[in-house]
Amino acid sequence: MADTAKTTHPQPAGRPEKGAEFGYVGIDAILEQMRRKAMKQGFELNIMVVGQSGLGKSTLINTLFKSKVSRRSVMPSDEERIPKTIEIKSVSHDIEEKGVRMKLTVIDTPGFGDQINNENCWQPIMKFINEQYEQYLQEEINISRKKRIPDSRVHCCIYFIPPTGHCLRPIDIEFMRHLSKVVNIVPVIAKADTLTLEERDFFKQKIREDLRVNEIEVYPQKEFDEDSEDRMINDKIREMIPFAVVGSDQEYQVNGKRLLGRKTRWGTVEVENTAHCEFAYLRDLLIRTHMQNLKDITSSIHYEVYRVRRLNENNTHPSDQPNGHSNGVPTHEVLSHEM
């Protein structure tokens, strides 16, 4: 008796083989679809660095992304100077790692805290942040808007605190008190290798006390924890705020390994060694664990507060006034919005 030939048919995509659980639908395939779409589109991250000159802002940013991405890395040295007023300068880079593309924009604020009179020095920075919200809002309310609106909103502001070892200065308190209401602020103690471990712990404790007394909410904010798991993770981060960091783009040989660090007479400060500084914790927060959360809070909290207030202003002050001015002030000239 001749054998009967059997025709085999390929399994549909996502369908389990024979013997798998009965009733499989394939809803979990949406995760792979979202991953593919995200990989095609790429990602955007906008980081602002604020602090007086000489605190290592450019070096830390270069260390974070292991690339020359800071403003000073791409600006000729003869153009580098201390400006008479605060200038806002941004540099964008396209970074790719393991097939994941990201457009990184680093916003620098040269001139901040470098003047004799630093009163209201936070205002130009506040104005810049709100201008990015305004730009996004105008794109959003257009009748014919773009399929994907370019996002120039500031997702995170790294604020550099000088390693004085005492307490926050009035300029630090004033800046964070105003700006924490419009952007995610992550405070760091710059050049922490200039402090002993005892001085560092005392300074961190004093800063946390100053933040509490002045009711300054830095990232991650308690009120935005989504569930108990988030709260547990973020509580550990809040206990480490501010991060005591050291930046370096120089490699040294340590125990047969090439490591980023700062060489001193007494040894090498290893940047990514958590026993030496807290740079690794900062990197994990900004890039590996909370990057999407930073963007989500910017979009759903800070930008939303700005959007609601601006739309309410438009309803209160109709656009029939000449030149789109309200009480003699251009409607887009907004210095601050506070929750």
Image (spheres, rainbow, N blue to C red):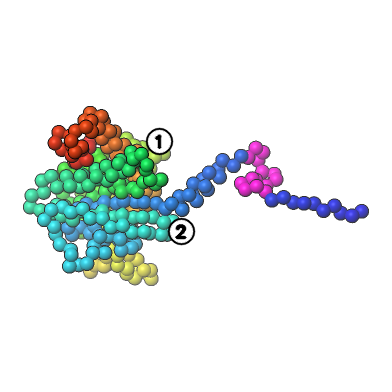
Magenta stretch: includes residue 12: yes
Residue for point 26% across, 35% down: 310
| Number of numbered discs | 2
Residue 197 seen in the current view = no
Report the amino acid beneath label 1: Asp
Q: Which residues are magenta?
A: 11-24
- Amino acid carrying label 2: it is Gly
User: Picture coordinates of residue 193 (x, y %)?
Assistant: 23, 59
Assess disc 2: are there few (<14), some (14-19) or many (≥20) residues with their C-alpha within 10 Å of its C-alpha: few
Dot 1 falls on a residue whose secondary structure is loop
* Residue 242, label in figure: none
Q: Main secondary structure of the magenta part?
A: loop
Earlier-in-chain disc, 2 versus 1: 2
Q: Is residue 7 above or below residue 313?
A: below
**Residue 18 spot, x, y in % from top left:** 70, 45
Secondary element under disc 2, as helix, strand or loop, is loop
Vertical relation: 265 (above or below) 280: below
Q: Which residue is mark 1?
A: 227
Which residue position holds label 2? Answer: 99
Residue drawn where x is 44% and y is 56% of the image: 100
User: How far, Cα to Cα, is label 2 from label 1?
Assistant: 32 Å
The image quarter in which residue 317 lies = top left
Q: Is residue 86 above or below residue 322?
A: below
Residue at image location 31% in from the left, 37% down from the top: 304
